[in-house]
Amino acid sequence: MEQVHPQRKWQDYFSFSTDHKVIGVQYLVTAFFFYFVGGALAEAMRVELSTPDPDFVQPEFYNQLMTMHGSIMLFLWILPAGAAFANYLIPLMIGAEDMAFPRLNAVAFWIIPPGGIFFLSSFFVGAPQAGWTSYPPLSLVSGQWGEEIWILSVLLLGTSSILGAINFVTTILRMRIPDMDIHSMPLFCWSMLATSALILLGTPVLAAALILLSFDLIAGTAFFNPAGGGDPIVYQHMFWFYSHPAVYIMVLPFFGVISEVLPVHARKPIFGYRAIAYSSLAISFLGLIVWAHHMFTSGTPGWLRMFFMATTMIIAVPTGIKVFSWCATLWGGKLNLNSALLFGIGFLSSFLIGGLSGVMVASVPFDIHVHDTYFVVAHFHYVLFGGAVFGLFAAVYHWFPKMSGKMVNETLGRIHFVMTFIGFNLTFLPMHPLGLQGMNRRIALYDPKFQALNELVSIGSYLLALSTFPFIINIVWSVFKGKPAPRNPWRALTLEWQTASPPIIENFEEEPVLWAGPYDYGIDTESIDGDEEVEDMLAEVAGNT
Amino acid sequence: MKIPSNIVTLIAGITLTLISLWYGQNHGLMPIAASAEAAEVDGLFNLMMTIATGLFLLVEGVIIYSVIKFRRKEGDTTDGPPIEGNVPLEIVWTAIPTVIVFILAIYSFEVYNTLGGLDPMASHDHLASHNHHEMVAMDEGNSQLIAMNGEKVALGLGQSPYLEESSPLNVNVNGIQYAWIFTYPDTGIVSGELHVPVDRPVQLNMSGGDVLHAFWLPEFRIKQDVIPGRESQLTFTPTKVGQYPVICAELCGAYHGGMKTTLTVHSAEDYQQWLQDNTIAQTPNSEQLAVNSEQ
Amino acid sequence: MQSSAVNESQLVIDSHQESGHHGHPDHRMFGVILFLIADSMTFIGFFAAFLIYRAIMPEWPPEGTPELELLVPIINTSILVTSSFVMHKGQVALKNNDIQGLQKWFAITAAMGVAFLAGQGYEYFHAEMGLTTNLFSSCFFAVTGFHGLHVTVGVLLILSVLWRSRTEGHYSSTSHFGVEAAEIYWHFVDVIWLILFVLVYLL
Ligand code: HEA
Ligand code: HEA
Ligand code: CUA
Ligand SMILES: [Cu+2]
């Protein structure tokens, strides 16, 4: 085994590489770039909102900030970040050499940076200002070019996401090593299956809506314009048919991440493997039939509101199964409270709040009160930041040694966690009472009686922005100066840890052996005694790294 | 899975329940409730807060307990117990949320029905027969009214099925970029503010001219989008005299945040007075006054 | 565009394979089918919008919409449906290693596709309405136009198969992904047309 393997050079990361690991890192770094952009826009909004009057930016510009913030965070941060881990991990986890379609994979990635830059360029012609939902007729009358750029960018990014999904499904279903049946693959793969199904079924409908919207905007048709005989509500249905599933597209990959991170650092098997796997599929299916819960005060007749209320609430059941199973995974374990697990636990506790407020807004009579208020803003930041972003940081800390071959600095990681956790709750918790008390969203000027809470929110958001610095310093420092990482620093059982850190170009020296299930921590080692290879592996996992 | 089944669990459970019950009633998060409907919604919200508090304490409790109790000892590289599932436990935590969700759905349905949400059709007929001429007036400007199978559908909240059929005060509401305009069909008053008498049902017939808006009364817990080309309506019965904000809740442009006015709920006499003041003189003078009072 | 490093990795993988690794199974058809599922959702989106308009508008098509001529679309429909069978003959020919047969049948299919597009062009040109006449006409042009785009892509795919088939041994009875992909795509476009035809012209 003394073969010398060529390693990646830094130039590869700036090229049209077809190696899924390079592409994964490219996705991740690009996503982080846009996170900082989207975050900076959010901070500008928070500066504006620390006083009731529109004194820092013009209301018009505020709406641009708000629209760009929402769209960037969703389409250029969370979606690519999910795809980043999917790209990096799926082939490694199932013992494949690469994705099913490496070139397609590279194309899917290389759509994103130009698409993102194109999107940002809309600031030069007046960015879109109709919110990330772009409801007509407002989107048709508030700046043509900004809006058209928004449409084209989202179409581009949607295409990228469809191409990615085709790759994920094919790879997961067709390229597992022969020993790995579908019930012994890691849960992250299950959640990516569920995610990809939603992408394939939902994104094209959004594309259809945006094509029609574009006609209205440019060619003078009136699909969604009541002034010409069209109907704006049809747009809302088409938009949410994608965009509700989209929120699960954004969170399911990180459900998968949590299912990986918790067992490793708690040293216990995942609790209820099949229940978690199937609940991903259930969430995915239910996610397709709840979209009108975003339209409870819109053009939806009463009986339709009742139908969508019922389907929406039912999603609490499969999600609850996951949350409880994760708690049970922690229970009785031997928790190694490092940065990855801290963020995993942060995910659990914050996502819970967002989920509970989600079920509240699913109730029609209550949603009638809080729709389009800061209560909803609080809800979705709890699930998106508290869920997806916390999960993402857990993933970064967990797989950083694998990706870079270096260990991170735990102290900085913990500082990052504490600052993020406090800043996050300080920012988004007070938004609940704000919304209930009567502060609507998407406003640059508000009633002075809300000022105190808004100041608190703004202070929280500054802390949140500061919290990224220990993270950035940690990552940059570790990449260059970090302690070299062994192949399996966490003594984990999934296949990606059976190869070098960072993995060699062809992933595995020889086809990896599936000698244990992905979560068989604490299994009786005597029962598989005798096999030499397995004993080697066990010795390694047992901790003398 | 070892579930600690001793007295401590019992005490923890009782405490949790008590805290949830208490907090569900005393969270003080909602603004005052100025209508009968608002009280209904608050009842629902209180129940949801109770359940949410309970679930929150339960899950966070488990997490915090685990973090403290099941920390790895320094140098311990052994694994935890290989527990992969527990069927009875999993059935319980599937069944309980299912039951909770059913209860919430049914209760929400009840409240929604009480608000008149399932009945806008019926009350629309009622409206059409009594005030046909206003409807026609409203239709002007909406060249193409959207209808389902030829019949118009009103969106929003109609008359509560539990209320006696009484003749509501009709007000036509028009939402335009950045103002609300209220027209009183019975008296011809046009105003930038909404004035209604206490304890009498009010029915707002809403239409919009340009983009989407949403009519929101936080103290009454009701909201409905105003959609150009469609009609929508809101029905409510104010129970508390006072002044309340009227807010546009749907993004409608740069000054969306400034699109607000006030709703004044008068006592019966004051309302008559207001009617008189405004009917006698829809003069520039009084409009001047209205504008001034807005600022 | 490919960097040297990638070629390097290719090399490694290739040598890897020679050393008795299991071969690369072909997943491309699987991918094509996933793509078509996604693509069909775009059409379902359009059709759903169309049906909603139909259901909620007081009059559909709106007053003053000229009657759609049926003659050209019916001819077009039969051309497209027939072309699917013609194309299949091409694939069957290939299965018998008859490249010439493949070329013949595919060429006819491409010609039929072009005929379809010409028919559609004729129809557009002679329609008494434009894109912005009213909601119905907008829907009509958007849906048929989007489908026409798919037909165009299909014709291009067929032409590229024809182009490649000139190379000796590019396609054979055992290696025919391009042929199959073009064919399944063409059938897909065909089925969509039938649904579209019923919705837009007949309903
Ligand atoms: C990651 C993204 C994400 C996720 C996961 C969710 C999850 C959920 N969301 Fe959320 N949502 C958004 C992102 C997300 N949402 C966004 C971005 C918006 C706003 C869009 C916009 O307007 O701009 C939004 C808006 C939104 C609305 C519309 C509000 C409005 O505009 O008026 C509704 C209404 O039903 C809703 C419901 C739900 C529900 C029921 C869940 C459920 O999936 C939550 C399920 C989880 C739990 C319930 C917690 C765990 C469960 C248990 C512990 C079991 C026991 C629990 C019970 C029995 C209650 N969401
Ligand atoms: C994943 C999604 C995501 C994330 C992570 C966030 C993160 C944040 N959001 Fe976001 N938000 C949305 C998705 C998201 N948001 C969406 C979808 C909307 C709806 C838009 C709409 O209505 O259309 C919204 C709307 C929204 C609003 C409501 C606007 C309105 O209705 O008027 C507010 C208000 O406070 C807000 C605030 C914040 C803040 C303070 C953060 C913070 O977490 C951000 C923290 C900041 C950073 C972490 C950046 C740190 C970096 C720097 C400061 C620069 C340094 C630079 C370098 C080092 C290079 N958001
Ligand atoms: Cu009108 Cu917002
Ligand atoms: Cu949703």
Image (cartoon, coloured by chain):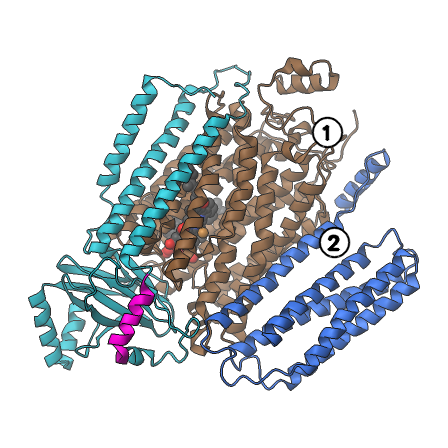
Chain colours: A brown, B cyan, C blue
Asked if residue B126 lies in the magenta stretch, the reply is yes
Which of B197/B101 is in front?
B101
Assess whether mark 1 and mark 2 are in contact (beta carbons under 8 angstroms). no
Estimate the spatial distance between the alpha carbons at disc 2 and disc 1, rounded to whole Å: 32 Å
Q: How many marks?
A: 2
The residue at which mark 2 appears reads as: C1
A20, A241: nearer the viewer: A241
Residue A512 — which label? 1
Residue A108 seen anywhere in this rendered image of the structure: yes
Numbered disc 2: secondary structure = loop
Please give the range of residues in magenta.
B119-134
Q: Residue at x 58, y 33 (%)?
A: A399
> Which residue is depicted at the point 85% across and 33% down?
C20
Q: Is residue A424 left or right of residue B75?
A: left
Q: Chain of mark 2?
A: C
> Label 2 sits on what residue type?
Met
Crowd around label 1: few <14 · some 14–19 · many ≥20 (10 Å): some
Please indicate whether residue A526 sits to the left or right of residue A246 in the image: right
User: Which residue type carries mark 1?
Assistant: Pro
Reply yes or no: does residue A530 show up in magenta. Answer: no
Q: Which mark is residue A9?
A: none
Q: Residue at x 75, y 59 (%)?
A: C184
Is disc 1 placed on a helix, strand or loop?
loop
Image quadrant where residue A95 sits: top right
Left or right of residue B281, residue B28 in this image: right
